[in-house]
Amino acid sequence: MDIDRLILGSNAFEGVSYISRSQSLHYQEQFGKAGNIVPILDAAWNLGVRSFTCSNCENVLSALAEFDRGRDLSLFPVIPNAYEYAREASEKGVLGAIKSRTQGISMYQKVRLGLRALSKIGSVVSMDVLKLLVELINLELASFEKYKMSGIVLHGQITDLALSSRNGKIIEIFQNFILETFKTQPILATHNLGVLLPKLMEWKIRIPIMAPLNERGFMMRPTGADCEKLVEESGYDFIAKKVLAGGRLSPEQGFRYIADKKVASVVVGVGSVSEAYHTFAVARSALKL
């Protein structure tokens, strides 16, 4: 898999913290303003980071538009934006959430998507989740059409839903749809690597995986040892995330551990300019970039 070794993550920009609820609220307030994201994108760029994984969030998309190198970044959109749908649906209802998701796309795209969605009403009524998933992918990726997409990541909640329901068809449809329609690399995110990968082998599905990998075993399920073994022995392509164990490890600890693992790339998020310079300097040294 041809992919940069280091990718900037966007959890902080999207108000997600694994440290505390108060930290999440701080991130939501701080990065609700796109102007507070741009300096971090700039710091990451200065440290040689050319890839960025993010969801379809208004503040992140606004920051990309403001960042003068936004069109030069390799983007890895994570879709559908499950956290934002849940957050907005609780405030605005399901239709309000969908309406909000379409604010960043043109009228032509809305009409095109709307006509296609109308043709799928029978599918939605009959609970055909697979066709609905395709419509959500189209809806969300419309916001990224003007950028360079180097890969498209299926949100971990959808991957793990397919896993829990033993429905490999969801993953097959996602993989084929991304390859055929967008001509780019499909990727699965998961928090259940040790369970998912044996099922992918059983289903004969070969696809890159983005999963937690850290010395604490944080979010490595069922166990850290199981996940480490699969990474080392399976031959699949991996993108490591949660390498700092959700903020519980220093960059020195996290990247020392990950440096000799069989991973194609590492995703790491930061919450300030100073943190960006420190984290990515350590990462570049540990990964020998």
Image (tube, rainbow, N blue to C red):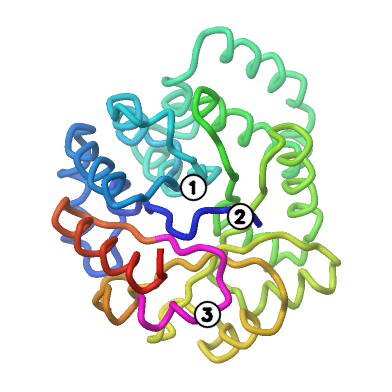
Image quadrant in which the C terminus is located: bottom left
Q: Which residue is mark 1?
A: 82
Q: Is residue 158 above or below residue 39?
A: below
Task: Return the x and y of residue 144 as percentages of the image width and height.
Answer: 51, 29
Q: Marks 2 and 1: CB-CB under 8 Å?
A: yes
Magenta span has 261? Answer: yes
Mark toward the viewer: 3 or 1: 3
Look at mark 3 in the image and give the residue it sits on: 261
Q: Is residue 111 left or right of residue 97?
A: right
- State the SS at label 1: helix
Label 2 secondary element: helix
Quadrant of residue 133 in the image?
top right
Q: Looking at the rendering, which quadrant does residue 122 occupy?
A: top right
Work out whether mark 2 precedes mark 1 in sequence or the reverse, and give the earlier one: 1
- Residue at point 28% right, 42% down? 41
**Residue drawn where x is 45% and y is 48% of the image:** 53
Q: Amino acid at mark 1?
A: Ala
Residue 273: x, y in percent?
Answer: 16, 51
Q: Nearer the viewer, mark 3 or mark 2?
A: 3
Q: Between marks 3 and 2, how big is the CA–CA gap?
A: 26 Å
Q: Quadrant of the N terminus?
A: bottom right
Asked if residue 214 is among those painted magenta in the image, a careful observer would answer: no
**Magenta stretch bounds:** 255-267
Q: Is residue 193 left or right of residue 206?
A: left
Q: Quickly name the residue at label 2.
A: 158
In this rendering, position of residue 121 left or right of residue 64:
right
